[in-house]
Amino acid sequence: MKSRTMLAIAAFGATLLCAATASAAQFVGPGPDGRETLSQTYRESRMDDEAYQRSVKATKVFDNLWYVGPGYVSVWLLETSAGLILIDSAQEPYVDHVLENIRLSGHDPKDIKYIILAHGHLDHFGGAARIQEISGARVVLTAEDWPAVEAAGTRPGRNGAPPPRVPKCDMVIKDGDTITLGGQTVKFYFTPGHTDGALSFEYTVYDNGVPHKAFFSGGSGGRGGLKGAEQALGSAIRLNRDLVGVDVFTPAHAWTGGNQYPNGSIFERLERLKARKAGEPHPFVDKASFDTWLKAINTNAVELVAEEKAKLAAQPAPARQ
Ligand SMILES: [Zn+2]
């Protein structure tokens, strides 16, 4: 099992987490808070370590893009001349941290026009209701995943907390749809697999005025069962066929890295960005690593389909009546 699942998470008791594109990376070295652990994947996904999660401060990544999330799940803020687009929203107890990071970045949460959700899991949409109330933003997701968001509002939250506040089904996005705001166009890709309605998109970032095509993955890899595996394979084949010219990757989890996305996780790249000198390449502009990721999600999905089929074949046949 090379990747796909976030085994480290299970080891420390998190409740609802994504397995977007985790890899079993085995880096050793200090994280943003200076601590050392054996595994970068483990280190950067310490969901219940509030002090650590709140230590991740807003960082400007491109002329028009900020990282404003905690550590275990990404939140990106895209600036346009006509307002802000928030990419994912984290969940309680970190929504105030996201809001504080947005303010630290010099922006007003009231200027958020769209909140784009990766998929219908709480770690991604858990902050959307509060941020929508503050901003009046439209909340964007697929028809396939909106029911999961609404259903989550009827169940207890993390660690026995009351049901989370969730947005009502607002803006429904289909494959190929676009949103344009202040000169920025976001083009959506329907990429089921991790959930039935995971939502990915391409957009444009600028490094000292030079444009680059960026891609946000709303989750890749199946989440168990043949159906999810086959969905993930279909999504991987489609992205490999249709994504052209992407050289910047902004994944839904900042610990994404390792063999599947080599040359450093998002946090490692943020560290390198801080140390970048004039004229040096931007550590997030890395087409080779993105192409490796594209190939890896395909290879992993092929393997997963085979594993799921083997599991089904190994099951005893149902007794005849
Ligand atoms: Zn998820």
Image (cartoon, helix red, strand yellow):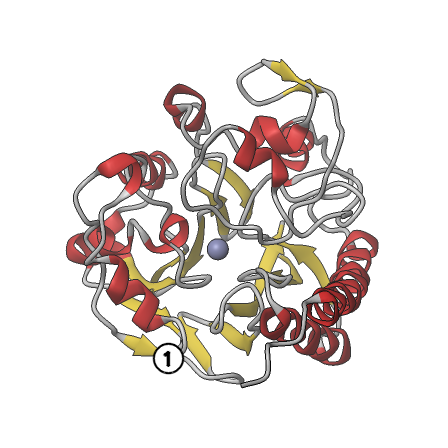
The image quadrant that residue 7 belongs to is: top right
Instruction: Identify which residue, 222 or 318, lies in the foreground.
Output: 318
Q: Amino acid at mark 1?
A: Ala
Q: Would you say the beta carbon of the disc 1 residue lies within 8 angstroms of ligand 1? A: no
Q: Which residue is mark 1?
A: 143
Q: Residue at x 76, y 30 (%)?
A: 26
User: Badge 1: how crowded within 10 Å, few (<14), some, or many (20+)?
Assistant: some
- Left or right: 106, with 136 as reference point: right
- Left or right: 248, with 85 as reference point: right
The vertical placement of 21 against 44, above or below, is: below
Q: Residue at x 59, y 75 (%)?
A: 227
| Residue located farthest toward the front when viewing the structure as drawn | 321
Q: Residue 247: image x %, image y %?
A: 73, 59
Instruction: Identify which residue, 194 or 252, lies in the foreground.
Output: 194
Q: Residue at x 33, y 72 (%)?
A: 146
The image quadrant that residue 157 belongs to is: top left
Q: Residue 34: image x %, image y %?
A: 58, 14
Q: Residue 59: image x %, image y %?
A: 50, 36
- Disc tally is 1
- Left or right: 76, with 139 as reference point: right
Q: Secondary structure at mark 1?
A: loop
- Left or right: 251, with 173 as reference point: right
Q: Residue 319: image x %, image y %?
A: 59, 77
The vertical placement of 5 against 221, above or below, is: above
